[in-house]
Amino acid sequence: MAEVEVRDIRKSFGGADAVDGVSLLCRDGEYLVLLGPSGCGKTTLLRMIAGLEQPTGGDILIGGKSVKGLPPRARKIAMVFQSYALYPHKKVGQNISFPLEAQGMSKEERDERVRWAADLIGIGHLLERKPRQLSGGERQRVALARALVRDPQVFLLDEPLSNLDAKLRASARLELKQFQQRVGVSTIYVTHDQVEAMGLGDRIAVLNKGRLQQVGTPDEIYHQPANAFVATFVGSPPMNLMQRDGRLVGFRPENVRVVKRSEHGDGASAFPCRVIRIENLGSDRYVYVSVKDDAGESKLIAKLAISEVIGVQADDEADLLVEKRFLRFFDRDTGESTAA
Amino acid sequence: MRSRPLVSILRWVVLLLFALVCAFPFAWAAFTMFKSNDDLYTVGHVPFFYNSPPTLDNLRVLLTETAFGTFVVNSVEIGVIVVILTLLASVPAAYAIARLTGQWGGKLAMLIFIIYLVPPTLLFLPLSRVVADLGLQDSIWSLVLVYPTLTAPFSTWLLVGFFRTVPRDIEEQAMVDGYSRVGAVVRTVLPLAVPGILTVVIFTFALTMNDFIYAVAFISTSSQMTVSAGVPTELIRGDVFFWQSLMAATVLVAVPVALAYNLFLDRFVKGLALGGVKG
Amino acid sequence: MSAPPATRGTVIVEESVRVHHLLDRDSVLGPVLLAPLMIYLAALVGVPLVTVFVYAFSDATTGSESFSFVGLETFQRTLADPVFQGAIRNTIVFTVLSQIIVIVLATILGFVMSADFKGKWIVRFLILLPWTTPVALSALAWLWMLDSLFSPFNWILGQLHAVPIGTPVAWLGENNLAVGSVVALQAWRTMPLAAVILMAGLTSIPPELNEQAEVDGAGFWRRLFDITFPLLAPIMMVAILFGIVATFTDMAAVYILTHGGPGNATQVLASWSFYTGIQGGSLAQGAAIGVFMFPVLVGVCILMLRRASGVEVT
């Protein structure tokens, strides 16, 4: 177990910067999630930590020691690939014991540890199978057992849930979290799915276009986004943004009420709007509205609990009410968060 | 395409015509090899029947009284050694092109393919000088030396395609799991590329069997000759043709080679499609 | 959690890691893996290729180690030689004629073979024989099949009274027939590979394209010429290039079937180069003859390169 630190790390592929000066610390035992859209450099960053990609600049430290130039095998890391990369020609048991063979461990010792890891993950009954005989969920567990078996300093997980169907994903997420809490190994987890990120991460690092946008707890990321990108990338539906008085004003859809013109009380900002459409989603109701702002017009969404009574319908002129404490402000040009 | 009866019949007619044209010389050879001399060389005999009972005599003559056995042994010996040398050179090179060399790997694959197109009929003169300088003329080792020029480029080209079908994740996982690049390749990529490598083995072997010009240019001693060169040059003595034995030799070589090709043809075709030509 | 089993005598890899450190760099490992092949090919293909040209400008013979440069003299002598002129003409004629036949037949064969049917395996075996058999041996089978006395064709023609009894057709002894025989042999032995390659191309055309066209109202011939053939063209090109190289540079077929005869009526560049260079002992002139194959090969290479850098994204 160890902390992982990257310092001003860069990687360019033929002139294009995939990772452009990222500095980041994953504390000992921490669950750090790298979140970003595809092509943001998160996987490249993970692969550089693994040693599969050589950085063009900067440094990587694992357990306080620079691993720059060290091949993957010297970094004592375990990695789970998106595809799980199970060795198709080896049985499950042989797959799990493969990293131990590399260490030159004796047969009995290997068997003992394979048994331990397999039981911990709950796949003790699969050891004699070939990977192609396994379901998606079982494959993911085998990959985890193989990562776990060798006592790594760090776990690197590259979108390990993206190959599972939606139903399985929720339970697998829970298992992943519980598993990491038990073994307590520093974990860096790459995903483009903000729900996974919010649910799993002790902290989340949001990346875009090769640059770090914000690092913080899920709460901070959600409620105090550092810039307009984070604000609109995290949350479903994302934060509403509109241009007012030369800056961007943002608020979360669930922090809004939509009322008929001039029915509101004090302490809230009112934005005149027109209701476009109301969508009933079972537990929630989405109200799509259009607001006049500096840019002309912005389409915004209000997310209201189904229990909440609303007094508007499509084509009504209405007011959006947002309490002041929910308002966030961003610079119009840079997108950076600014004070109220 | 839905198969209507007429289409189906037409297909069979066309196929049988093609099969007839392609296989006729061999069928004729197979038919001839069992004929006795009386039957064969009597003008006026209908050539499509056995006018005298078929005989295995010609086969016996070929196998016991000619150097055919020696040719086969030489060909197999050369084939096996060249296969090993070819794999030793082309497996690492193909892996490097498929994985390690990035953009200029594609260009190298192209260069190697162009080398494959340089024909032996252009190179045999300078190579015969090289062989003579090394004192290898009239020895199978001269062929062992030059045959990889025929086989290695093509093998490399096929192998590049096969290696590219192995997911990168697998070897990277092995590297994370504690192996060096070479160790990871040996333990994961090579086992997964076995079908491709077997295909290369078959075709390498066949290419060495197929060569004619090097074999006749470098070797003039019967005891060192290959099948391809030995049968047509050594088993024909002046104007005397032992046709049945010659045809027996042809059939004995043609059938097993074609069977081996058939086993691996699908993979070979896939290899052609995957190969370095796509750059 | 249950603790992992204690490791007895944990093995630390770190020491051995440093030893192979250099080979862990892709930029080092790549060239190291490529080196044996590239060095070998440079020595035994690259150098000889240059040497051929050196010989062609010299008076080298097989007998002596030393030679001197004579400029274009060897070329002049070669070009003036009527046998050479015939050889260059034959080489082109054999290649062009045989490959035209191959394009037509291989396309038909590719089509009928691309369907699944019972007994495909045995049919495929028979059809591949001409390609898989060493050319020297299949030429031998042709030599017997075209024997002037015992050819089955002659017997049939005799029975049909197409030719006078007692004057058998000399398939290999009469100029035009000999040329025809060689063309037939070359087409016959290169056709299966072309068909196989075309078959691969046909199976790689997505069936949706043809189905879409059929829905859009295109008939069979329309689909064939507007969809199948254009999509097939690049791979057909590969098949033809293989065929051209195989035919253009081959000497075994001519050497065994006709020995270049009758007279020198079927002599080709490769065989004439062999007769002159090895049997005649004149390295210089043999090389000068061979060099004339070069422009065509360069042309083939350029076509290949253009194809590789072209549109294709599969």
Image (cartoon, rainbow, N blue to C red):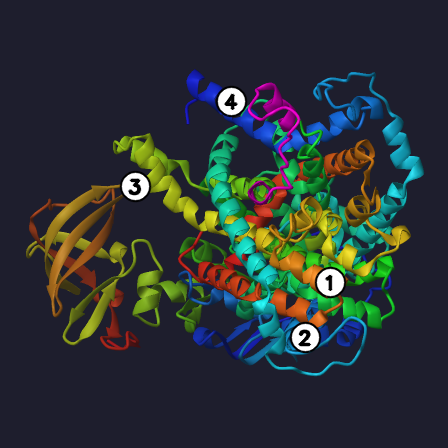
Query: Dividing the picture into quarters, in which one does residue A217 lie?
Result: bottom left
Residue type at numbered disc 3 = Ser
Tell me the number on the disc at residue B13. Answer: 4
The crowd level at tag 2 (other Cα within 10 Å; few <14, some 14-19, many 20+) is many
The crowd level at tag 3 (other Cα within 10 Å; few <14, some 14-19, many 20+) is few
Looking at the picture, does residue C284 appear above or below residue A151?
below
Q: Which residue ends up furthest to the right in the rendered image?
A: B64
**For this rendering, which residue is in front, A120 or A232?**
A232
Do the residues under discs 4 and 2 have CB atoms within 8 angstroms? no
**Residue marked by disc 3:** A283
Residue type at numbered disc 4 = Val
Q: Is residue C178 magenta?
A: yes
Callouts 2 and 1 on one subunit: no
Q: CA distance from mark 2 to mark 1?
A: 30 Å
**Residue marked by disc 2:** C55
| Residue A66, horizontal then vertical, whole percent | 64, 79
**Residue marked by disc 1:** B89
Q: Is residue A90 visible?
A: no
Magenta region: C153-180
Q: CA distance from mark 1 to mark 3?
A: 66 Å
Q: CA distance from mark 1 to mark 4?
A: 46 Å
The secondary element bearing badge 3 is classed as: loop
The crowd level at tag 4 (other Cα within 10 Å; few <14, some 14-19, many 20+) is few
Foreground disc of the pair 1, 3: 1
Callouts 1 and 3 on one subunit: no
The secondary element bearing badge 1 is classed as: helix
Residue type at numbered disc 1 = Ala
| Residue B150, horizontal then vertical, whole percent | 69, 58
| Residue A310, horizontal then vertical, whole percent | 16, 45
